[in-house]
Amino acid sequence: MSLKKIGAFGTALAASFALAYGVAHAVAPDSARTSGETSAHATGGHGGDEHGSQEQGGQEHGGGAAAAAHTPGGLQVSERGYTLDLLTPRLPAGKDGVLRFAVRDADGHPVTAYRAEHEKELHLIVASRDLTTYRHLHPVRAADGTWSTTTALPEAGTYRVFADFTPTAERDGLTLGADLAVSGTYRPATPPAPAATATVDGYTVRLGGTLRPGEESELTFTVTRAGRPVTALQPYLGAYGHLVALRSGDLAYLHVHPHQEAYGTETSGPEVSFTAAVPSAGTYRLFLDFRTGDKVRTAAFTVTAR
């Protein structure tokens, strides 16, 4: 039975926008710089039931309880009394550096109690403003609530850091975002042109489906190698695939999960399907993380919603 036919798993997606998130290496492995071949209903966080419920990641600009329920995640550094405090505001380009941060509550104290979502207390996404570099990291939390992870960002410029988490005091998850400066000689780039296929480490991934603003869209990714279907996708953080995506322009963040029940003994692949909803026309960058041969790989796509 293909994954396309199995039921929704985990949080489905955040509907007021943004696409983003996938899942990469379990502790802090980085998806390589992407060059076209690598790596709304409610929030852009991980929270929600395991049958496809969705939650809102941010508060809508303009204020008000109704507006707060429909804003894309990751656009705000503070939300619902929580603040992302980026303790490392800059890193050097092309070198390993330690990225440190804390999530603070309304009283300014670091949060130390989180609900585990997809096997982790917090998922960290780092993406360049030009959407050509993407990292999905799983930092380590110290007893005092400070998080840290080592990463290397290849090019100078401005990056967006997204913290995706659910405090134990909250029912729903949230996604906070902050800017990170990477020093060095800046060479602006643009995302690769839209294409239906991406290649990474000898695997070819084909994207089927169309993003349409204001409505749910079915997206199916088919993984092959040397022209043969890959039927041995490995579970990773509770799923056979995670879709990460960002909206070009403001890097609004959306996390979607594949359609699947708990994995069993049946064929895992070659298809992984998602339901995605985007709020506006425009360009989106999609990052699909999948695991084969005990390694997480990232296939990246540029998609236009119209």
Image: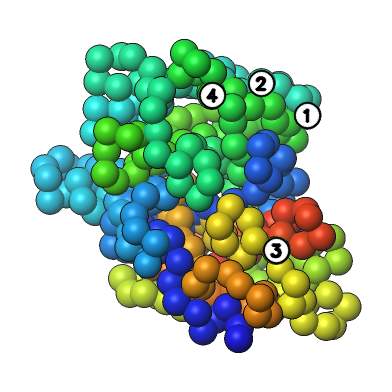
Mark 1 or mark 3, which is nearer to you? 3
* Mark 4 burial class by Cα count in 10 Å: few <14, some 14-19, many 20+: some
Label 2 – label 4 distance at C-alpha: 13 Å
Residue indicated by mark 3? 234
Task: Name the side, left or right, on which 156 lies relative to 95.
Answer: left
* Mark 2 burial class by Cα count in 10 Å: few <14, some 14-19, many 20+: some
Residue 15 location (% of width, % of height): 33, 61
Image quarter in which the N terminus is found = bottom right
Q: Amino acid at mark 3?
A: Gln
Residue indicated by mark 2? 98
Q: Amino acid at mark 1?
A: Gly
Mark 2 or mark 4, which is nearer to you? 4
Secondary structure, mark 1, is loop
Label 3 – label 4 distance at C-alpha: 27 Å
Nearest to N terminus: mark 3 or mark 4: 4
Residue 278 location (% of width, % of height): 38, 65
Residue 173 location (% of width, % of height): 34, 44
Label 1 – label 3 distance at C-alpha: 31 Å
Nearest to N terminus: mark 2 or mark 4: 2
Label 2 – label 1 distance at C-alpha: 13 Å
Residue indicated by mark 1? 94
Residue indicated by mark 4? 141
Mark 1 or mark 4, which is nearer to you? 4
Q: Residue at x 30, y 22 (%)?
A: 105
Q: Residue at x 66, y 75 (%)?
A: 265
Secondary structure, mark 3, is loop
